[in-house]
Structures are given as structure tokens and as C-alpha cells.
Amino acid sequence: MSDNAQPVLDLPGTGLELRPWRLADADALVAAGRDPAISHWNLLPEQTPDQARARVERMHERWAAETGAIWAIARVGGGEVVGLTGWIGVDLGGGSAEIVYWVLPAGRGGGVAVQAARRLTRWALDDLGLHRVTLCHSVSNPASCRVAEKAGFTLEGTMRGALLHADGRHDQHLHARVRGDD
Ligand SMILES: CC(C)(COP(=O)(O)OP(=O)(O)OC[C@H]1O[C@@H](n2cnc3c(N)ncnc32)[C@H](O)[C@@H]1OP(=O)(O)O)[C@@H](O)C(=O)NCCC(=O)NCCS
């Protein structure tokens, strides 16, 4: 992974692409931290522009350390950021990782998250060579459950009290896609 630059991945027909985050994208992270839904479901705190730039730097450090791979969902040609998607908990030896995503309010409802998750899954299984990728969300977040279903992540079960959100502990759905799934 770290032998190569993080690739730009196409999202045909959307006018969007997945590209590495840049320091100049910090305002989008600041906006995400102010969005109540992203802040709540993605546990993203409010942050200053300096803190957002530090977060972008940590994304690149994780790529270099081969523990994470986070992309901006952005207008093609290096344009405006509409969301984030990527892999956390990358385990190259074990062949697994967990997908994360959010979309800023103006970009929601048009299939962006589903297309981004499908594209990133193809990259993880076919290009990176992982065997099993997971997707976890609170059972109280039906939009994320729909993204999981439409992106081909099978529901495997419910992890009780698995995540602490601002309003208390939430049960989480565990979805996964394994190499060879249709
Ligand atoms: C969840 C989120 C990423 C979805 O992004 P999006 O680009 O709007 O998603 P898509 O348009 O690809 O698809 C969303 C699907 O969920 C459905 N959906 C949206 N809100 C829903 C709700 N409250 N209940 C049930 N389904 C819902 C949509 O109708 C769509 O399904 P459809 O195409 O069959 O109609 C976005 O809403 C978001 O960022 N939310 C806040 C943060 C968050 O929840 N992050 C995920 C943490 S696990």
C-alpha cells in the first residue's frame, strides 16, 4: 500500500471522484464537524481549521503506516469536497478493513454514498487484495443501513452496546462483504 501513492478512483456518471484529502480541503472537514448528523453518527467533533488540517495530515500518515485509507468524495478535477469515505482498521496481514463514510447535507439523497462504497469496495477487494470488509452502523441510523444493503454488505448480526454516542450506548449492525460475494 505505502509503496504506491494513494490513487484517484473514478465514479463514472456522477461528476465526482474519490481523491486523497488536501490541506486546502480543511473547510469541508470543519463543515462536517458542525453538521449534527455527521457529528453524531461519525463521532466527528467540531474543529478549527488548524485541527482539520492536522486531521488531513493524520490521514496521510495512516496511508503511509498502512493502517487507514481515507478519500475525499469530490467534484472531478480536484474540485469541491462533498463527502468522505475510506477504510479504518486496515489489517493487510489479516486481509480486512472497515469502511466509513459521510456526505455533507447538500450532497445527500443522490446515491453518492452507495456509489462511493461500491467503488471503494472494488478497490479494496480487487486491487488491494483484502478478503473481508465490514461496515458498522447504529441500528438507529436507517440511512446508513440502506447504504450497506445497496452497496452489497450482508447483514451478519447486531453487536449489542457496541458504540458510545452522545446520547448513550447504541447497538450496531455488523455488515460485511467477503471476496467472492455476488
Ligand atoms: C448516511 C449517508 C452517508 C447517506 O448518504 P447519501 O449519499 O445520501 O446516500 P445515498 O443517496 O447513496 O443512499 C441513501 C439511501 O438511504 C435511504 N435513506 C435516506 N434516509 C433514510 C432514512 N431516514 N431511513 C431509511 N432510508 C433512508 C435513501 O432513500 C437511499 O435509499 P434509496 O436509494 O433506496 O432510496 C448520509 O445521509 C450521511 O452522511 N448522514 C450523516 C452521517 C452518517 O450517517 N454517516 C454514516 C455513519 S455509519
Image (cartoon, helix red, strand yellow):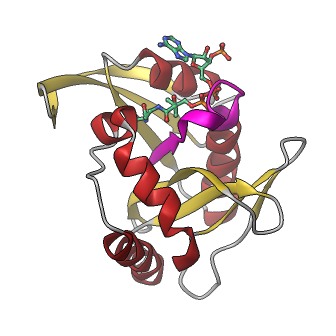
Vertically, is 3 above or below 164?
A: below
The residue located at (32%, 41%) in the rendering is 39
Q: Quadrant of ligand 1?
A: top right
Q: Position of residue 150 (x, y in %)?
A: 63, 23
Q: Give the vertical position of 68 relative to 37 (above or below).
A: below
* Left or right: 16 as drawn, with respect to 152: right
Q: Give the camera-side residue of 37 and 2.
A: 37
Q: Nearer the viewer, residue 59 or 74?
A: 74
Quick check: is 3 in the magenta stretch?
Answer: no
Task: Give x and y (percent) for residue 43.
Answer: 27, 44
- Residue 160 visible to the viewer: no
Residue 170: which quarter of the image? top left
Residue 12 vs residue 113: left or right?
right
Q: Looking at the image, which is closer to me, 82 or 102?
A: 82
Quadrant of residue 24 within the rendered picture: bottom right
The span picked out in magenta is: 98-114
Give residue 11's position: percent from left, percent from top: 80, 48
Position of 151 with respect to 53 (left or right) is right
* Quadrant of image for the C terminus: top right
Residue lying at 40% horizontally and 75% vertically, measured from the top left: 62
Residue 104 location, quadrant = top right
Q: Residue lying farthest bottom?
A: 3
Q: Residue at the location (16% across, 32% down)?
A: 162
- Residue most toward the right? 13
Tell me if I can see residue 119 in this picture: yes
Report the quarter where the N terminus lies: bottom right
Magenta segment includes 108: yes
- In the displayed structure, 47 sits above or below 145; it is below
Residue drawn at x 60%, y 61% as measured from the top left: 129
The percent coordinates of residue 153 (x first, y second) are 54, 29
Is residue 72 or residue 30 the one in the foreground? 30
